[in-house]
């Protein structure tokens, strides 16, 4: 759509019968399209310096304008930009109609590109010669179409590009804990820490029947985790302050369970007490030092059981992709083959949860549109 005034035909190949099948289910059907905080820090890549260089492009500062150019209206929910309509399906239909009526676009829906052959100064695709190619085929997540990595990335690989190490990203933390699973549906504000990798994420966490989910977990799994992960149920309080607060109640008749209800949902409190081997009717006055120690360990250093490997497509995005070292960061053009461009999740650029990935896909598309217009004018 950024090329609507471009004086040449654009053929868009889409393997599905409709455009944006995955986009329809993004953001729980409401589509997060951007974020107020948007810098290289919220993204991961195996080439951190190149990522920083890429983010110097002026279009990263023009995020809202870029959405307007696409006719996307937003509302802000905290830092997140959400579709004003709150209806991803309707928005995809609108964008699809706009593409159908764009004069210079030839849509080839239900047409999967199986190969791209370099021919002279152009590219042969499905028996047609093209002057330039934009690869925007996403990552490993495929709607009902789970394939091996070599198959998913066969087009860039066949054109001489390297794929960095890829792993599923933005998913759940899956483990077996039958007692915790009984609390499925409970949400709380917590902090996850990967002890080995020395990184933490604090946000809302949801207990599910297979482990943990929610915004903190999605962001935490943006990078592959070690098996040394700890959960803190009280991220806004230090362990020392908590102990002091408990001890300040020793003179009264306060029940520990009632005291803890100030911080956490009742059922979670009961489970925390059970794990700390403390009875639910104990008064703080009668709490032994070693019981308080056990409680603090459960509250502040709850060790997660061994994590199951995250898999596609239970994760939203792919960490890794076409290496940035083979791409001109100013234009997203291949350094290996001129007039070959990359857009969106196919690249080794992976954002956190909260509009970062759709945001990046649209900004990168805008960068490539500029580059193509400029190269045609030269
Ligand atoms: C459930 C879910 C929810 C999400 N929610 C959000 C959110 O709210 N906000 C956010 O920022 N991100 C979200 N994401 C991530 C986001 O959807 C992707 O990062 C983003 O869509 C990437 O855009 P893209 O254009 O690079 O790739 P895609 O959107 O994956 O599009 C690639 C397209 O290329 C087509 N294709 C692939 N190979 C071929 C081929 N060989 N020939 C023809 N066509 C081909 C595919 O069918 C697909 O339609 C979510 C992801 C999932 C799975």
Image (cartoon, grey):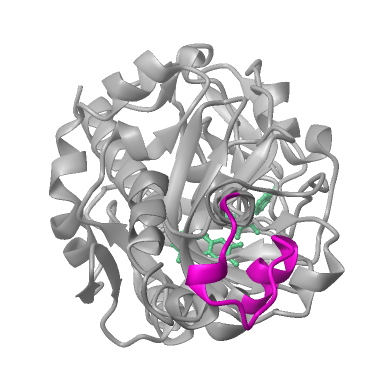
Q: Quadrant of the N terminus?
A: bottom left
Q: Is residue 148 above or below residue 33?
A: above
Residue at image coords 49%, 50%: 219
- Foreground of the two, 133 or 145: 145
Residue at image coords 75%, 32%: 154
Q: Quadrant of residue 64?
A: bottom left
- Foreground of the two, 348 or 120: 348
Q: Is residue 358 above or below residue 92?
A: above
Residue at image coords 41%, 24%: 333
Q: Is residue 235 above or below residue 45?
A: below
Q: Is residue 240 above or below residue 100?
A: above
Q: Quadrant of residue 229?
A: top right
Label count reads 0
Q: Where are the magenta residues, as a range?
A: 270-289
Q: Which of the four quarters of the rendered structure image does ligand 1 lie in? A: bottom right
Q: Say if the magenta span includes residue 40.
A: no
Residue 350 visible in this rendered orientation of the protein: no
- Foreground of the two, 352 or 98: 352
Q: Quadrant of the C terminus?
A: top left
x and y, in percent, of residue 342 in the image: 47, 34
Task: Using residue 5 as the reference point, say whether residue 285 is left or right of it.
Answer: right
x and y, in percent, of residue 252 in the image: 37, 77
x and y, in percent, of residue 358 in the image: 41, 56
Residue 98 visible in this rendered orientation of the protein: yes
Q: Say if the magenta span includes residue 279.
A: yes
x and y, in percent, of residue 58 in the image: 14, 34
């Amino acid at each position: 759509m950024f090329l609507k005034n471009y004086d040449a035909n654009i053929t868009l190949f889409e393997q599905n019968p409709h455009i944006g099948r995955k986009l329809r289910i993004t953001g729980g059907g409401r589509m997060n399209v951007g974020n107020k905080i948007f810098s290289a820090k919220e993204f991961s890549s195996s080439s951190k310096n190149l990522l920083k260089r890429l983010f110097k492009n002026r279009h990263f500062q023009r995020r809202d304008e870029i959405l307007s150019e696409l006719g996307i209206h937003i509302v802000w929910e905290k830092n997140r930009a959400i579709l004003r309509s709150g209806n991803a399906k309707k928005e995809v239909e609108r964008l699809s109609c706009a593409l159908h009526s764009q004069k210079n676009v030839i849509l080839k829906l239900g047409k999967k590109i199986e190969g791209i052959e370099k021919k002279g100064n152009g590219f042969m695709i499905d028996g047609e010669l093209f002057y330039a190619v934009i690869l925007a085929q996403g990552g490993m997540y495929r709607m009902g179409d789970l394939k091996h990595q070599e198959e998913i990335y066969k087009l860039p690989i066949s054109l001489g590009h390297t794929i960095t190490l890829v792993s599923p990203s933005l998913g759940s933390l899956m483990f077996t804990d039958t007692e915790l699973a009984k609390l499925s549906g409970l949400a709380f504000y917590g902090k996850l820490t990967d002890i080995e990798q020395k990184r933490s994420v604090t946000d809302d966490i949801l207990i599910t029947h297979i482990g943990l989910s929610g915004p903190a977990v999605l962001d935490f799994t943006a990078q592959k985790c070690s098996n040394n992960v700890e959960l803190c149920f009280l991220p806004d309080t230090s362990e020392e302050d908590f102990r002091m607060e408990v001890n300040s109640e020793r003179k009264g008749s306060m029940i520990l369970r009632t005291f803890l209800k100030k911080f956490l949902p009742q059922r979670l409190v009961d489970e925390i007490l059970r794990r700390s081997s403390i009875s639910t009717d104990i008064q703080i006055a009668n709490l032994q030092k070693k019981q308080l120690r056990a409680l603090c360990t459960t509250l502040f250093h709850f060790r997660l059981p061994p994590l199951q490997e995250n898999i596609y497509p239970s994760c939203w995005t792919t960490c890794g992709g076409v290496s940035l070292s083979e791409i001109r960061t100013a234009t997203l053009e291949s350094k290996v083959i001129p007039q070959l461009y990359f857009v969106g999740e196919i690249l080794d650029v992976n954002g956190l949860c909260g509009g970062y990935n759709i945001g990046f896909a649209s900004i990168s598309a805008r960068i490539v549109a500029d580059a193509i217009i400029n190269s045609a004018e030269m």
